[in-house]
Amino acid sequence: MRLLVTRPQENGERTAAVLRARGHTVILAPLLYIEAIAAEFGPGPFAAVLTTSANAARAVAAHARIEELRGLPLYTVGRRSAEAAKSAGFAIVHSADGDAHDLIRMVVRELTGAAAPLLYLAGEERSVDLDAELARHGLKTPTAVVYRATAAERLPDEAEQAIAGGELDGVLHYSRRSAATFLRCAAAVTGLHTRALALSHFCLSAQVAEPLLAAGSLHVRVAPRPDKGALLELIAST
């Protein structure tokens, strides 16, 4: 298949390499650019660290207090974010193998009654209020914003030309915001929005698919599990 990958550059290159190894033709179109933020964590101590994105672990890897955090157990949503945490030096990493709601359930099950707060390393924009959800179970979860994702204003020229020329079969979407950004960028070029909607859209989760369905796309497919392996399986089954 001829596919467009909309992930941030580093993640997109890894995904593209896997897809090309499987015989697909790939164009990269990073729609979100990740920038680390020098966050304040508060005094601590903390019982554990929580993340809902691989970007959080990467962003905090050079933080002045990283050694203090590396000794704590880290709970995260899935395998990709768990791998990023291990690469950042966290030795005790627990993956919920799902999404933020699966993470909440795991944390409630394993950490309810923790004497110290849990530190949530977050992005500037969040789809789930982890602090509020965990507070219902008596857990204190101060949030430290450690990165922001800046949205692109236009698709790369190569991507615009491929869509306009009918040279693509599908698009991979890994976040709700990147899917919405894709639609906005396509709408910025006369005639491109209709062609963009006509493509097959492979989405990591139902939440990711929402902007595409709302825009009227008739070719949206959602991975059976919210992880990259399931998304690749979805493409292979097409």
Image (cartoon, helix red, strand yellow):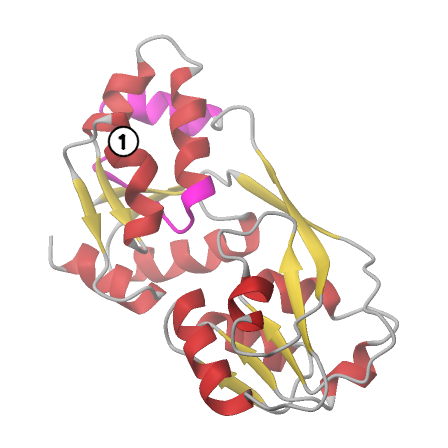
Residue 221 position, x and y percent, is 19, 48
Residue 103 position, x and y percent, is 45, 74
Estimate how packed mark 1 is, as few (under 14), some (14 to 19) or many (20 or more) residues with alpha carbons within 10 Å. Answer: few
Residue stretch rendered in magenta on the structure: 157-177
Residue type, label 1: Ala
Residue at image position (69%, 87%) is: 47
Residue furthest to the top in view is 190
How many dots with numbers? 1
Q: Nearer the viewer, residue 134 or 144?
A: 134
Q: Nearer the viewer, residue 220 or 236?
A: 220
Q: Is residue 79 visible?
A: no
Can residue 204 be found in the magenta stretch? no
Q: Secondary structure at mark 1?
A: helix
The residue under label 1 is 214
Q: Is residue 106 left or right of residue 192?
A: right
Residue 163 position, x and y percent, is 30, 25
Residue 104 position, x and y percent, is 46, 74
Residue at image position (47%, 52%) is: 12
Residue 89 sits above or below residue 57 on the image: below
Q: Is residue 126 left or right of residue 67?
A: left
Residue at image position (84%, 70%) is: 42
Q: Nearer the viewer, residue 147 or 41?
A: 41
Residue at image position (39%, 39%) is: 179
Can residue 160 be found in the magenta stretch? yes
Hey, which quadrant is residue 227 in on the image?
bottom left
Quarter of the image where the N terminus is located: top left
Q: Is residue 132 left or right of residue 99?
A: right
Q: Is residue 234 visible?
A: yes
Residue 167 sits above or below residue 229 on the image: above
